[in-house]
Image (spheres, rainbow, N blue to C red):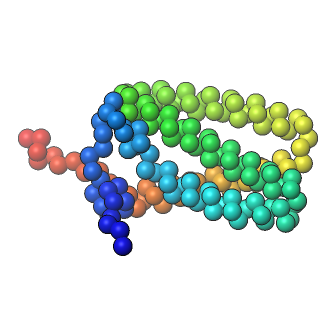
Amino acid sequence: MTAPRAGEPGVPPMSAPRAGEPGAIRARLPHLRLPLLACAVLAVVGVPAAALLRGPTGAAGVAAGIALVIVSYLISSLSVAWADAVHPKLIMSVGLLTYVTKIVFLGVALAAVAATGWSGLPDMGVSIIAAVVVWTGAHLTWALRSPLPTVDRSAEH
C-alpha cells in the first residue's frame, strides 16, 4: 500500500513552487491525469468498436478525433500553466490568445479535411464530441474531488 500523495483528493497539497521556480509548470498540471486516463479508455473502447462497425477508416476517424481533443486541451493547459508559472497576470491574455489561435487552426484543418471528402470525417466528428464530453466530465470529477484552497483571514490582522 502506498502513502497518500499531496494533491490527491483529501490530502492537503504541499506548497507549490512559486512562479519562476523549478517545477512551477508541472505543479500546475495535476488536473491532467484523470482526463487523459478517461480519454485513453475512450480510445481503447472506441477505436476497436469503430473498426468493427465502420472499418479501418472509421477507426482512423475515431482515433484522430480523440487525439485532436487531447492535443487541444493539452495545449491550453500547458500554455495557461506556463503563463501562471512565469507571471500570474499573463494567464488571461495567454489563455485567450491560445484559444483564438487553436480555433483558427482547428477550423482551417477541419475545413481542409472536409474538402478532401474523407469518409472517416463523420466518425471523427462523433469522436470529437464524445472526447470533449469525456474530458469535461473527468475534469469536473477531478475538480469536485480536489480540496479547495482556504485562506486564514485571522492571520491577516
Q: Is residue 38 above or below residue 95?
A: below
Instruction: Point out residue 142 in the picture as x, y percentages from the top left corner.
Output: 45, 58
| Image side of residue 9 versus residue 73, left or right | left
Q: Is residue 52 above or below residue 123?
A: below
Q: Quick one: 8 or 103, which is closer to the camera? A: 8
Q: Is residue 78 above or below residue 150?
A: above
Residue 146: quarter of image = bottom left
Can residue 112 be seen here? yes
Q: Quick one: 26 or 138, which is closer to the camera? A: 26
Q: Residue at x 51, y 57 (%)?
A: 34
In the image, farthest residue toward the front: 1
Say which quadrant the N terminus sits in.
Answer: bottom left
| Image side of residue 94 versus residue 147, left or right | right
Can residue 147 be seen here? no
Q: Residue at x 42, y 59 (%)?
A: 144
In the image, farthest residue toward the bottom: 1
Residue 25: quarter of image = top left
Q: Across the whole image, how many numbered discs are drawn on residues?
A: 0
Instruction: Point out residue 59 in the picture as x, y percentages from the top left corner.
Output: 81, 56
Say which quadrant the C terminus sits in.
Answer: top left
Q: Residue at x 70, y 65 (%)?
A: 45
| Image side of residue 79 versus residue 2, left or right | right
